[in-house]
Amino acid sequence: MQVPVYLITGFLESGKTSFIQQVILEGNFVEDEKTLLIVTEEGVEEYDTEALERFNVAMVTVEDKKDFTVDYLKKLRREYRPDQVIIEYNGMWPVNEFVRMQLPFGWELYQVVTTVDASTFQLYLNNMRSLIADMIVSTSMVIFNRCREDTDLQLLLRNVRVLNSRTEMVFEAENGDILDPGDDILPFDLEQDPITIEDEDYGIWYLDALDHPEHYEGRQILIKGMVFRSKNFEPDVFVPGRMAMTCCAEDITFLGFMCKSRHAVRLKNKQWVRVTAEVRSEYKEEYHGIGPVLYAKKIEGAKKPEEELVYFN
């Protein structure tokens, strides 16, 4: 029998304990199954031990990272024989280490959920970006809690999307209501022909094209980008794109979409160009699915922008 493992990540006071208790007390998740709750971080909020017992949940704590080993997890498997496992994971422990860990036989990592205090997200993003990126790249759901009326939900969404384009996001108000981030107010005019993307808006356009390909299907766009050509590309393919800092100054990612043109063979890597192209949604192995493909109508040389790095605000 497969034992699903749910990893709940997030910094201290991000709402991990509240989320786990809510899931357990609702009863739909645990039902009559035996659940093992492994807590690796002590926060201000404490678990209701009587409620845990009522729902057949056994809780153990791990205070030191050196004790959180495969052998220890195997010991817990033998001792508790759980039907499912929930781990409240210390926010300062790298998530990628757990993802790579060889879990006990029969245990399978089923879902990673990251809780985020929306009021402190930007502060952590500015000062601990690599830790946030480590959490988000592996997560299947990000829960932003404590959102206020003045919280820029679209800014939160964009910063997560660039790290993990497939993760689900939930925005929760301080009173517990679920908020709709709505449609982003784009800084460019979708009614233009071609839709002209200024240098400072490239990042927002890139994410919008990923999330809302219908905005651009069959339309013409005008973008500036740096040429990338790979020996694995067809002769008529190149990527005009921009560099973006995803998790830290040492981790720079190239963001761009494949572009087809009979003039591609004449272009050189790192050359700056201005491209007018028609956008179509097509399946590409490089995308691992369907994504925007540009069909160039015009390619011109261009000067590199004053700020070469892409931002998402």
Image (cartoon, helix red, strand yellow):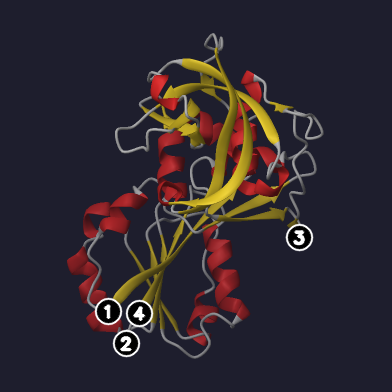
Tags 4 and 2 in contact by the CB under 8 Å rule? yes
Q: Amino acid at mark 2?
A: Met
- The residue singled out by tag 1 in the image is 106
- The residue singled out by tag 4 in the image is 3
- Quadrant of the image occupied by residue 35: bottom left
Q: Residue at x 35, y 83 (%)?
A: 82
Tags 1 and 4 in contact by the CB under 8 Å rule? yes
**Residue at disc 1, secondary structure:** loop
**Residue at disc 4, secondary structure:** strand
Residue 310 visible in image: yes
Percent x, y for residue 309? 51, 21
Total count of labels: 4
Tags 1 and 3 in contact by the CB under 8 Å rule? no
Q: Nearer the viewer, residue 216 or 86?
A: 216
Q: Earlier in the sequence, mark 2 or mark 1?
A: 2
Q: Amino acid at mark 1?
A: Gly
Q: Amino acid at mark 3?
A: Asp
Measure how far apart labels 1 and 3 are at the Cα level.
37 Å
